[in-house]
Image: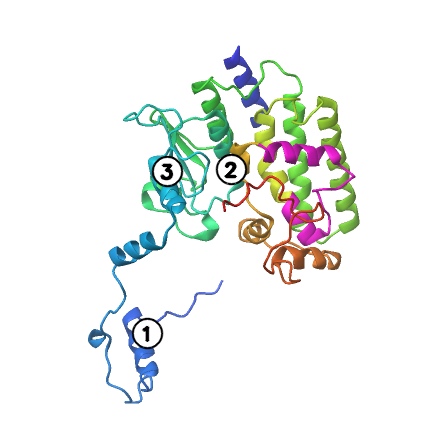
Amino acid sequence: SHTTSCMLFATTLLTIRTPLRAPPVRMQLNNMIRTLMGGGGGNGGGNVSAERLEDAAPSWEALAAKLDTASTDDERAFRQDLESGRAARACSLASQRLFDLPDGEAPRLTLFRDTAAWCPYCEKVWLVLEEKRVPYEVKKVNMNCYGDKPAWFWAIQPSGGIPVAKLDGQVIRESNDIILAVEEAFPDRPLLPQGDPRVRPLLSLERELFSAWFRWLTSSASEGAQRANFEALLRRVDGELAASGGPYFLGADLSLVDCMFAPFLERMAASLPYYKALTLRRNDGWPRIEQWFLAMESRPSYRHVQSDFYTHVHDLPPQIGRCQSVPEAEVFAAEIDGSDGSWSLPLPEDDGSLLQPLQGLPARPP
């Protein structure tokens, strides 16, 4: 049964120094004002105080009116669709996604995810919800490395980890548990084939690949051996995709296995050329992985959740620690950062040579 498949899937997933105290903010502000107005910070020059300054900034209402005047019809429609929850595609700014939920009916599920949409564990849950078209609300909190979490979140998640979901009032605190609960609670559009013996070894391979990538990315020890180990694992992944007939891990249809692989293959494709001079995309060494990426990018559920190379190479270090580079990666880093002029306008068309393929991006409206 579908429930039995979910249970089997679940079983597989389980197998300093103190800084000097800063002066009060008002004291800092007054010192800045005195300096700007020609007075020394305590030498008697200038008698301007913060209380005598006039706030000439426009109001929020005035700014909103100015934005509305400058906006195109498409931009206004986008904001309205976003607020309504009925937008045609996923967006990190959305606070709700209603899909086919009848008007007036509240979603059964609330997803608590990171504010910037950079968390890979949030991404795989997000992808499953989009693919299954499960209505959901979004509550955003910071990742630990980007700021404090509010007290109300600590009350429902003592570890502080994200994502968290609340489904029919039940709090679920781990990404894989959330995915399994969603698969059981919303059996329409199933993503877990019943009794497929390939699922468990593929999920084990995903974790093996992740571990090898993480160790290599954050270490400069045994560089050659780590690269060889990772490339061997990539060949195994490519072989599994070939054996399935592709383009997905279980064949012609997307499954939960693809949703598990997606966030980290995406980050590998961005980070490895930048730090280790190894390209995953458009590499003849693993053509089936490229076909998998293209198949995933043809799905709106993934294309509008996926992030770009530049974002990932800079959002990873705060999350996982310093990433170790090799000199050969400098040319790739320059292209991703744009320091080689590759960001000059007009941007080049994708002729098949760009480091990050752009074929799946929708054409810009005229």
The spot of residue 266 in percent (x, y) is 61, 41
Q: Which numbered dot is residue 123?
A: 2
Task: Report the colour scheme.
Answer: rainbow
Disc 1 target residue:
28
What segment carries the magenta color?
Answer: 269-298
Q: Which amino acid, by three-letter code, is at mark 1? A: Gln
Q: Nearer the viewer, mark 2 or mark 3?
A: 3
Give the vertical position of 317 relative to 9 (above or below).
Answer: below
Disc 3 target residue:
81
Marks 2 and 1 close (CB-CB < 8 Å): no
Mark 3 crowdedness (10 Å alpha carbons): few <14, some 14-19, many ≥20: some
Q: Secondary structure at mark 2?
A: helix
Instruction: Choose top left, top right, bottom left or bottom right for residue 212.
Output: top right
Q: Main secondary structure of the magenta part?
A: helix
Give the vertical position of 325 relative to 272 (above or below).
Answer: below
Q: Which amino acid, by three-letter code, is at mark 3? A: Asp
Q: Earlier in the sequence, mark 2 or mark 3?
A: 3
Q: Earlier in the sequence, mark 2 or mark 1?
A: 1
Q: Residue furthest left?
A: 52
Give the vertical position of 286 relative to 134 (above or below).
Answer: below
In the image, is 125 to the left or to the right of 229? Answer: left
Marks 2 and 3 close (CB-CB < 8 Å): no
Q: Which amino acid, by three-letter code, is at mark 2? A: Glu
Q: Earlier in the sequence, mark 3 or mark 1?
A: 1
Instruction: Choose top left, top right, bottom left or bottom right for residue 136.
Output: top left
Name the residue at 67% across, 53% down: 274
The spot of residue 120 in percent (x, y) is 54, 40
In the image, is 203 to the left or to the right of 158? Answer: right
